[in-house]
Image: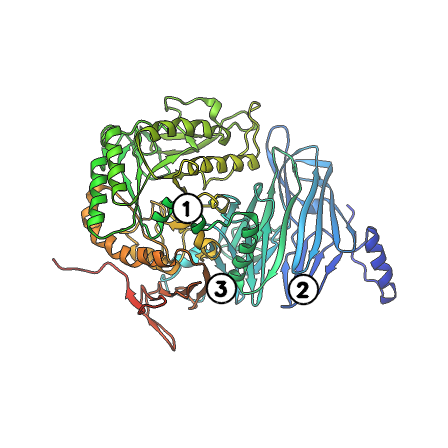
């Protein structure tokens, strides 16, 4: 196997070498691209690293990467690029890297070739996968491996990724005792995730890292076919992959890293893939501000003010809590299945809230002095929540049928509120009356795309090219009878984009994204305020609210993190003035973790989020009013102002500070001890809120013992 070795040229040959580089001559050494800010290095096997020169910090790794190939039987193999012959062609301000041939344990392809181009920028460089040729089927290219790496245990280091609101994984966590803080350690250690870009998993196409005073970020320009491989303080062995080393006996290093994986498009590279790596200042805040500049250029940055100009109904969501009311549960009777949403599917059926009671709640809210609310109905459809999608119409008879839903809508709107219905055009249930396999995604092997198991059993994934037909059919019936002013889409702004191999309807992930955008625009053009699950920035030109940006699902928020990493407001540092962010229905206010919900939303200046049935309403009314008076009114004052800063103030990350562009400042203490500084004192589960022209508010949040 050929490897081109690094040569050191005497000074006398310096200008000759420059001439060779400018001519495109194949050098027999690793190239160096360099300016005053960055130096880019490639070793003799193709591993990429670079130096932040102003901060004298090295990034990258000695690992090269992998290619994923499969043969005729569809079985993929992960093959190290170190098995290729590697060569370099250097030009004046760019470099071509060439990997030739591949040798796996099972698959070999002597004709394989991968060409990567590196080009200098003032503050970094671009990386472009120009071409992949192979006689096998291309699945993925994972290169450059461990591009941003921070070794565990070093001080002042972290990686960040825009997962949900945003996650940060520090290289150290110097806090806690015995079992206190262990849930935080679990969130940042031995983590490995594959996060799909352009979805609720990674809702902005960038990621970054920081070490000491050096901060770097990557912005992915071809993001439809890209996945981020995230490792959080896990043990990486000598081959560059994570290994279980709980006893500390294996060679390798514990580290955090971020690596792009470039997915094939219908089995080929199909088009060049590109990202920009840049040096930035001020850590994750600086990264978010840099991406905000790009978001404004791309058209994804559309403010709530602009949306109100286009549709005055959007103004009703400013300061409005998300009051999600559940109408009808009607689980399929298949006990051998367990739904992802929790309960065994055992035939349980119940009307939780009638449509008349929805109207009663709206009138209660008005009498309580609540000016703003969005009432969002789940399970309003014919067969109940998560049953027989996409056949939603007509409304369920038990809660009141068509006339009952129409009257509920009118009574809600009479109070000046938003009235929205929960809908889903990702999942088709096989028992739905209009189910037809022609609407379903087809895999390359001819099988259909299977989804999750919910209250209606196993779902099949709809090809997004078909959803407009299905949406128009349903909306025709809904709009003829229900004068709603808002609509919420489950799943569509959350799930990863899919390919379709149906010969009659071939579809790439890029095309999938275009169809999703068309679905949202279809509903926006009907004059409705549009919302989506979790949220992703490709949808923000249309979507005004997202349910799940802070987190949500089966686990409740622990104050500091949700499932992986520590929560950091990357999304709001870019888009706070563009969207209203709610918790998902799995983690509503008024339940186990009420205090942490309130604290996080006051820190970010967001309204509250509720998920309930009618029997709970009377008990929750005082809590609803209390949180509205704090959070709803705060959002009404600040919704159109950007988040300009965020800091962690304590070693355990429990004390945080945010600032908005109108001068509003918030300090929050998620911890169990009082935070003291020279200028302020914040009690456990407490906050300090300073709004221009008002007296500061200092409070604690909890559920106190009240003797009856």
* Residue for badge 3: 172
* Residue for badge 2: 37
Give how far apart the Cα atoms at labels 1 and 2 are.
40 Å
Which mark is first along the chain, 2 or 1? 2
Locate the N terminus by quadrant. Answer: top right
Residue 354 visible to an observer of this rendering: no
- The residue lying toward the viewer, choosing from 454 and 224, is 224
Please name the residue shown 28% across and 61% down the image: 701
* Residue for badge 1: 544
Marks 1,2: beta carbons within 8 A? no
Q: The residue tagged with tag 3: helix, strand or loop?
A: loop
- The residue lying toward the viewer, choosing from 643 and 496, is 643
User: Which circle, 3 or 1, is nearer the viewer?
Assistant: 1
Place of residue 7 in the rendered image (x, y in percent of width and height, measured from the top left): 81, 59
Q: Quadrant of residue 212?
A: bottom right
Which mark is first along the chain, 1 or 3? 3
Please name the residue shown 26% across and 33% down the image: 405
Locate the C terminus by quadrant. Answer: bottom left
Q: Left or right: where does residue 124 sit relative to residue 494? A: right
Q: Is residue 644 above or below residue 25?
A: below
Q: The residue tagged with tag 2: helix, strand or loop?
A: loop
Q: The residue tagged with tag 1: helix, strand or loop?
A: loop
Q: Is residue 324 above or below residue 435?
A: below
Q: Residues within 10 Å of mark 2 (few under 14, many from 20)?
A: some
Place of residue 215 in the rendered image (x, y in percent of width and height, measured from the top left): 57, 62
Give how far apart the Cα atoms at labels 3 and 1 are.
37 Å
User: Which circle, 1 or 2, is nearer the viewer?
Assistant: 1
Place of residue 163 in the rendered image (x, y in percent of width and height, measured from the top left): 47, 50
């Amino acid at each position: 196997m050929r490897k081109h070795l690094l040569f050191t040229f005497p000074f006398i040959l310096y200008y000759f070498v420059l001439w060779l580089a400018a001519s495109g001559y194949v050098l027999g050494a690793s190239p160096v691209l360099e300016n005053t800010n960055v130096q880019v290095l490639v070793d003799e096997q193709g591993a990429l690293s670079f130096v932040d020169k102003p901060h004298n910090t090295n990034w990258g790794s000695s690992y090269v990467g992998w290619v994923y190939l499969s043969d005729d039987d569809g079985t993929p193999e992960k093959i190290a690029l170190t098995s290729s012959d590697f060569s370099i062609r250097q030009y004046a301000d760019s470099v071509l890297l060439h990997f030739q041939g591949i040798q796996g344990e099972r698959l070999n392809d002597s004709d394989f070739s991968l060409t990567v181009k590196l080009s200098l920028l003032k503050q970094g460089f671009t990386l472009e996968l120009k071409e992949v040729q192979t006689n096998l089927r291309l699945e993925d290219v994972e290169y450059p491996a461990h591009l941003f790496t921070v070794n565990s245990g070093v001080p002042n280091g972290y990686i960040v990724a825009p997962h949900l609101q945003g996650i940060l994984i520090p290289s150290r966590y110097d806090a806690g005792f015995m079992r206190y803080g262990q849930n935080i350690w679990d969130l940042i250690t031995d983590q490995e995730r594959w996060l799909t870009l352009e979805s609720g998993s990674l809702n902005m196409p960038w990621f970054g890292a920081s070490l000491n005073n050096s901060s770097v970020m990557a912005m992915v320009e071809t993001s439809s076919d890209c996945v981020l491989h995230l490792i959080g303080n896990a043990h990486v062995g000598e081959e560059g992959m994570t290994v279980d080393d709980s006893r500390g006996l294996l060679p390798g290093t514990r580290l955090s890293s971020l690596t792009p994986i470039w997915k094939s498009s219908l089995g080929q590279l199909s088009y060049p893939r590109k990202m920009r790596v840049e040096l930035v200042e001020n850590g994750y805040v600086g990264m978010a501000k840099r991406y905000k500049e790009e978001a404004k250029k791309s058209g994804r940055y559309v403010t709530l003010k602009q949306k109100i100009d286009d549709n005055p109904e959007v103004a009703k969501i400013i300061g409005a809590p998300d009051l999600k009311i559940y109408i009808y549960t009607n689980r399929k009777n298949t006990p051998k299945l367990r739904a992802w949403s929790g309960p065994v599917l055992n035939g349980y059926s119940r009307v939780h809230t009638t449509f008349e009671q929805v109207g009663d709640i709206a009138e209660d809210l008005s009498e309580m002095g609540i000016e703003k609310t969005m009432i969002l109905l789940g399970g309003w459809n014919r067969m109940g929540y998560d049953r027989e999608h996409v056949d939603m119409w007509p409304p369920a008879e038990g809660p009141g049928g068509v006339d009952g839903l129409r009257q509920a809508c009118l009574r809600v709107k009479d109070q000046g509120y938003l009235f929205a219905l929960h809908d889903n055009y990702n999942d088709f249930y096989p028992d739905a009356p209009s189910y037809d396999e022609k609407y379903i995604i087809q895999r390359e092997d001819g099988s259909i795309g299977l989804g999750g198991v919910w209250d209606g059993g196993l779902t099949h994934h709809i090809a997004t090219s078909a959803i407009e037909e299905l949406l128009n059919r349903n909306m025709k019936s809904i709009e003829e009878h229900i004068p709603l002013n808002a609509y919420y889409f489950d799943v569509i702004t959350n799930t990863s984009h899919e390919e379709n191999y149906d010969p009659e309807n071939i579809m790439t992930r890029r095309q999938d994204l275009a169809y999703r955008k068309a679905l949202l625009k279809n509903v926006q053009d009907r004059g409705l305020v549009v919302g989506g699950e979790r949220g992703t920035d490709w949808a923000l030109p249309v979507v005004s609210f997202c349910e799940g940006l802070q987190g949500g699902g089966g686990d409740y928020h622990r104050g500091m993190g949700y499932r992986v990493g520590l929560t950091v407001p990357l999304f709001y540092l870019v888009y706070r003035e563009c969207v209203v962010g709610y918790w998902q229905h799995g983690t509503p206010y008024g339940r186990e973790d009420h205090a942490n919900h309130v604290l996080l939303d006051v820190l970010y200046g967001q309204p509250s989020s509720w998920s309930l049935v009618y029997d709970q309403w009377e008990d929750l009314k005082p809590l609803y009013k209390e949180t509205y008076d704090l959070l709803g009114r705060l959002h009404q004052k600040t919704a159109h102002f950007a988040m300009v800063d965020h800091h962690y103030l304590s070693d355990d990350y429990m004390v945080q500070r945010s600032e908005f562009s109108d001068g509003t400042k918030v300090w929050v203490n998620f911890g169990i001890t009082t935070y003291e500084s020279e200028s302020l004192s914040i009690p456990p589960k407490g906050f300090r809120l300073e709004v221009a022209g008002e007296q500061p508010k200092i409070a604690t949040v909890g559920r106190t013992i009240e003797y009856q």
